[in-house]
Image (cartoon, grey):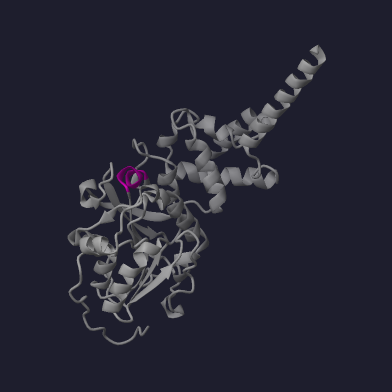
Amino acid sequence: MAASGKFSTFRLPPLPTIREIIKLFRLNAVKQLSQNFLLDLRLTDKIVRKAGNLTNAYVYEVGPGPGGITRSILNANVAELLVVEKDTRFIPGLKMLSDAAPGKLRIVHGDVLTFKIERAFPESLKRCWEDDPPNVHVIGNLPFSVSTPLIIKWLESISHREGPFAYGRTQMTLTFQKEVAERLTANTGGKQRSRLSVMAQYLCNVQHIFTIPGRAFVPKPEVDVGVVHFTPLVQPKIEQPFKLVEKVVQNVFQFRRKYCHRGLGMLFPEAQRLESTGRLLQWADVDPTLRPSQLSISHFKSLCDVYRKMCDEDPHLFAYNFREELKQSKSKTQEKDKDKDSCRL
């Protein structure tokens, strides 16, 4: 699409309401897919406003459903809106919007978890990572069932500067269950501090910008919904491979009510666990009696840096998985028990 010259202000022509679209195409929400429709256009307009200035922007909307946020994005005078929708039932309603906004809306029937966005928009939009964010935005009212795996996937994409982040530090404005939104933005020591807090905040500036009451959705979910804005950082706060950071953070938080040394110990084989955990904590200068929620990003940076050195010294260490060792140990015990039983017979 053309990206030069002034764009005239665009407004959608009169259309059936979202509620009427739902009735017209019999779009019942599927509980198994955790679908909840946002019908209040004042709220969808607010989500879009919080995404920033979208004039002449290129927007990637995930999970548009019946098209509530889609309408608000189109009315924000964007250059182009690309929507990716997995559920075929929503495509006719979205095509109605496409007809009402010629050349503005592109519809892809696909899965956001596998869709390749890298080549969807013009190359000219790409910016150096150190520059201001590109004029590309990701917006979406995510089904609860995919929100956590999707944000983890995108955080990894940020670390590799691929996917939506092949264009630069693309900003995202997304909905989550309120509890997940609170985890993403929780401070050190906070009740909701979690794996998600650390993984998001070491790579992004994360803001919980407002909460939408559950009653605003159809059907009404049992929880309220948080709208979260992400801006990737120029420099990540932990400069280690994503998978290494993820492994350290996951191990720490799997025993979130224990002292942090408990989870960190699971990074090492049982035979060397005590000694190696002690070395890791000593070299990282981390108090072993801190709880996982009390560990700051700086603590995790030190732990990841030291763990990386230990992995470099022992090439087999990073591949170690304590669950596999546990499984093998149980298997050996069962074999011994079988042998004992057969001897008795």
Q: Outermost residue toward the top?
A: 344
Q: Nearer the viewer, residue 41 or 184?
A: 41
Give left or right: position of 212 versus 1.
Answer: left
Give me the residue at 24% from left, 67% from top: 72
Query: What is the span of residues highlighted in magenta in the rendered image?
Result: 177-183
The answer to whether 328 is drawn above or below residue 89 in the figure is: above
The answer to whether 241 is drawn above or below residue 189 in the figure is: below
Give the position of the C terminus as an image quadrant: top right
Q: Is residue 26 covered in magenta?
A: no
Q: Nearer the viewer, residue 179 or 84?
A: 84
Residue 216, how many percent across, how many down? 21, 51
The image quarter in which residue 66 lies = bottom left
Residue 218, how many percent across, how many down? 25, 51
Residue 201 seen in the current view: no
Q: Nearer the viewer, residue 267 or 305?
A: 267
The answer to whether 97 is drawn above or below residue 206 in the figure is: below
Give me the residue at 50% from left, 42% from top: 249
Helix, strand or loop: magenta stretch: helix
Give left or right: position of 197 versus 324.
Answer: left
The image quarter in which residue 279 lies = top right
Q: Is residue 178 covered in magenta?
A: yes
Residue 326, how many percent across, how many down? 64, 31
Residue 96, how many percent across, how many down? 29, 73
Give me the residue at 36% from left, 85% from top: 2
The image quarter in which residue 40 lies = bottom left
Give the position of the N terminus as an image quadrant: bottom left
Give me the residue at 63% from left, 46% from top: 309
The answer to whether 93 is drawn above or below residue 36 in the figure is: below
